Image (spheres, helix red, strand yellow):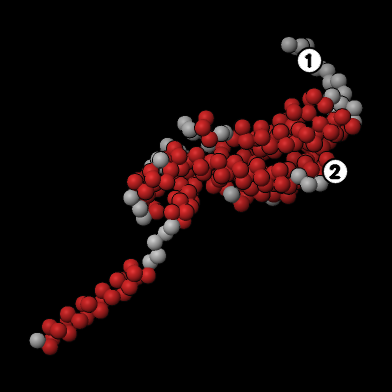
Amino acid sequence: MATEDSSSDSGRDKDRPVRAARRGRRRMTGTERREQLLDIGRTLFAERGFEGTSVEEIAAKAGVSKPVVYEHFGGKEGLYAVVVDREMSRLLSMVTGALTAGHPRELLEQAAFALLDYIERYTDGFHILVRDSPVAQSTGTFASLIGDIATQVEDILGLEFKSRGYDAKLAPMYAQALVGMVALTGQWWLNVRKPKKAEVAAHLVNLAWHGLQGLEHHPKLVGRRRV
């Protein structure tokens, strides 16, 4: 009998750490669970895209059931929309917040660095933004984000155009061209990561600035085509 009692006690002892761990595990609040699901969704969407990510996998990685994901976001589309919206807001904030200098060339440098900083620090987010998805119409697109950033730049560019005798009405077009150049170069740099970030920024500004410096007031086409 002593042996049986000892064996039984030993079994109970083995279960105690498990029960204690369960008691010590704090239940997540609704806000914490939502943030956890967003983090997991962000990682999966970056790796596999919208179509390659399932609610089942998101739930499994979070250690919850599928209904919990639906409860917080209404489904995969809702989760994706929030992830994209956050990344768009973050990038726009980084770029517009960086535009603090007074000299136009330094403003170009700050804008270029802001985008490259975002790509470097929030690579998953940038992967998500540049992907196409079937819910892009409701969440916005990378092109629309670039348009938002260009709008911030065109006001600064318009003042410079006016002070130098150029047609200020053309500033929006030039802003789109400059921001688009930086954005597309950023997409390329995301994959190659060479040269270093500062060197990429320097070359972008070199092309943009010296192009603006030699800007003609009334540019003419050199070829035969006119329409």
The numbered mark at residue 31 is none
- Front in this rendered view, residue 162 or 31: 31
- Say which residue appears at 43% left-offset and 57% top-offset: 29
Residue 41 in percent (x, y) is at 46, 47
Residue nearest the observer in this picture, 156 or 119:
156
Residue drawn at (84%, 21%) of the image: 219
Work out whether residue 65 or residue 116 is closer to the camera in this orientation and state it: 65
Instruction: Return the residue found at the far front.
Output: 30
| Residue type indicated by callout 1 | Gly
Q: Residue at image x 45%, y 39%?
A: 78
Residue 111 spot, x, y in % from top left: 73, 43
Task: Report the quarter where the N terminus lies.
Answer: bottom left
- Under circle 2, the secondary element is loop
Judge left or right: residue 207 versus residue 36: right
Rendering coords of residue 63 (x, y %): 36, 55
Rendered image quadrant of residue 171: top right
Q: What element carries label 1?
A: loop
Would residue 47 be visible to someone looking at this image?
no
Q: Mark 1 points at which residue?
A: 223
Image coords of residue 25 (percent x, y):
38, 66
- Judge left or right: residue 1 versus residue 134: left
Mark 1 or 2: in front is 2
Q: In which quarter of the image is the C terminus?
A: top right
Q: Is residue 97 left or right of residue 121?
A: right
Q: How many marks?
A: 2
> Which label's residue is closer to the chain start, 1 or 2?
2
Identify which residue is drawn at 90% across, 31% down.
164
- Residue 103, numbered label: 2
What is the spatial separation of the Cα atoms under label 1 and label 2, in whole angstroms? 35 Å
Confirm or deny contact between disc 1 and disc 2 (CB under 8 A): no
Q: In this view, does 62 lie above or below 138?
A: below
In the image, what residue type sits under mark 2? His
